[in-house]
Image: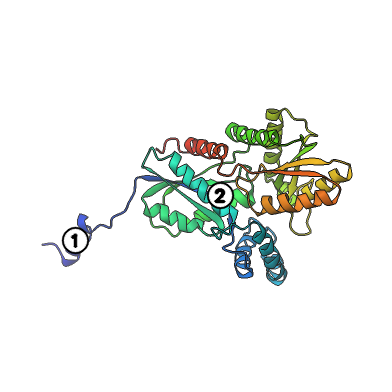
Amino acid sequence: MPSKTSSKLKGSFLPDQHPVVPNGKVGVLLVNLGTPDGYDEKSMRRYLKEFLSDKRVIEKPRWLWYPILYGIVLRTRPAKSGAAYKTIWNEALDESPLRTITRSQAEKLRSALKKTDRLVVDWGMRYGQPSIADRLVNLKAKGCDRILVFPLYPQYCAATTASVCDKVFESLIAMRWMPAVRAVPAYHDNPVYIDALSKSIESHLSKLKKKPEKIIASYHGIPQSYFDDGDPYHCHCMKTSRLLRERLGMSDDYLITTFQSRFGPDPWLQPYTDKTIEALAGEGVKNIAVVNPGFSADCLETLEEIAVEAAETFHAKGGEVFTHIPCLNDSAGGMRVIEAIVQNELLGWH
């Protein structure tokens, strides 16, 4: 005669008592850097605190960095950054352009992949909302037991691509049934990406009254020490520029590579974008164009730092014509890049 314990144990595994667990779908999660919820000081402080507390972004020892972060940076920078965000804010939707564009990229990708109902497309931000953790939970709840994470950074950098992967796997720790995960690698030399960038540059230049004397390919910078420690980011940026020159038939001294957005007193990758623009104007160059191949979507660093600040610097130093070439964003060319990469990375999964 079975014991009461064994009877109870057997009853706990009755099929009709098993929780319903959706599964069998494949998720695609587009991830970009991040965005504050607003340009007020409170929102900016919350965003900057999360961003600048990331050990991938600031590699200094915490005992050295935190007094600077909490004692100086978070007291002074929120107001300054908020004022900059205010100049580019999408007031109609009350959000930053990066959030608007990334959402649109996800919606257009969802539409392009609608031929199969197994795929679920979502989007998130490394810092701010919607968070990576929240979107992973959402995809899992929709039955995704396989998820492709797409960090929208063409060139690999530990402070961007690796940080996204860190957050993804940190989020999976809380899941009882973790999905299988793939991460899209750097696509800095992907032919589809180079072709789309080249066509975007050609299209923009064709609409100008006069050809620029110089084109600057400006990438986000990183501290020189990160490169010295083995980060491949600089090499990826240089290869993207080289492939663009080859594709566009431009010389090394016509399409030049620079690095922007440096932060703090330590040396960063050079040449610096702002110093290069000053120097060109000082040398008598009157007409330049700037493109940002390292950004998949226009954001503060492109719309304010380049299209506004860099333009003002150029004009103040004697330059006359400054044009900013938009990022690929959710354009037809930009979406061809995203869709082609997703389709390739999903091979064997759908």
Whether pointer 1 and pointer 2 mark residues with C-beta atoms closer than 8 Å, the reply is no
Q: Secondary structure at mark 2?
A: helix
Answer few, some or many: residues within 10 Å of disc 1's Cα (few below 14, many 20 plus, some between 14 and 19).
Answer: few
User: In what quadrant of the picture does the C terminus appear?
Assistant: top left
Q: Is residue 338 left or right of residue 226?
A: left
* In-front residue for pair 249/28: 249
Residue at image position (50%, 56%) is 132
Q: Is residue 81 left or right of residue 150?
A: right
How far across and how far down the image is residue 84, in percent? 69, 60
Decide which of 322, 327 is in the foreground and name it.
Answer: 322
Residue ranking furthest to the left: 1
| Residue positioned 54% across, 50% down in the render | 102
Give, as a three-letter code, the residue at label 2: Ile
State the residue position of label 1.
11
Total number of numbered discs in the rendering: 2
Q: Please say if 268 is above or below 36.
A: above
Q: CA distance from mark 1 to mark 2?
A: 52 Å
> Compared to 300, does 112 lie above or below?
above
Q: Residue furthest right?
A: 283
